[in-house]
Image (cartoon, rainbow, N blue to C red):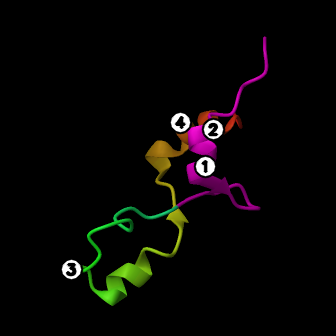
Amino acid sequence: MPKMKTHKGTAKRFRLTGTGKIMRGKAFKSHILEKKSPKRKRGFRQETLVSAADRNVIKKGLGIG
C-alpha cells in the first residue's frame, strides 16, 4: 500500500494543535468589509475548532488517518 499524500489545499487551510485538534480560519473576512462592524471584523481574526462532523475528512486530507 503506498503512502497517503497530503492534499495541499487542505494543508494550507487547516493546522493541528499540539493536542491533535484541528483549527481553521474564519470565513467572510476578505472583502465587502465596509458594512461589517469593527467588532465583527476582529472576531474573524481568531481561529476556531473544526466541527466534529468534518474532522475525519480533513484528517484524511492532511494525511493523518
Residue 38 in percent (x, y) is at 34, 88
Residue 33 in percent (x, y) is at 29, 75
- Label 2 sits on a secondary structure element that is helix
Circle 3: element type? loop
Q: Is residue 25 magenta?
A: no
Q: Secondary structure at mark 4?
A: helix
Question: Amino acid under label 4?
Answer: Val
Give the spatial CA distance, label 1 vs label 3. Answer: 28 Å
Mark 4, other Cα within 10 Å: few <14 / some 14–19 / many ≥20:
few
- Furthest toward the top, the residue is 1
> How packed is label 2: few (under 14 Cα within 10 Å), some, or many (20 or more)?
few
The N terminus lies in which quarter of the figure?
top right
Q: Nearer the viewer, mark 4 or mark 3?
A: 3
Amino acid type shown at disc 3: Lys
Please provide percent x and percent y for residue 55. Answer: 54, 45
- The residue that mark 1 highlights is 12
Q: Nearer the viewer, residue 22 or 31?
A: 31
Give, as a three-letter code, the residue at label 1.
Answer: Lys
Q: Identity of the amino acid at label 2?
A: Lys
Residue at image point 51% right, 75% down: 46
Residue under pointer 3? 35
Range of magenta residues: 1-24
Tell whether 28 sits left or right of 26: left
Q: Earlier in the sequence, mark 1 or mark 3?
A: 1
Q: CA distance from mark 2 to mark 1?
A: 6 Å
How far, Cα to Cα, is label 1 from label 4? 15 Å
Give the distance between the C-alpha atoms of the residues marked 3 and 2, in whole angstroms: 33 Å
The numbered mark, 4 or 3, whose residue comes first in the sequence reads 3
Q: Which residue is mark 2?
A: 8
Contact, mark 2 vs mark 1 (Cβ under 8 Å): yes
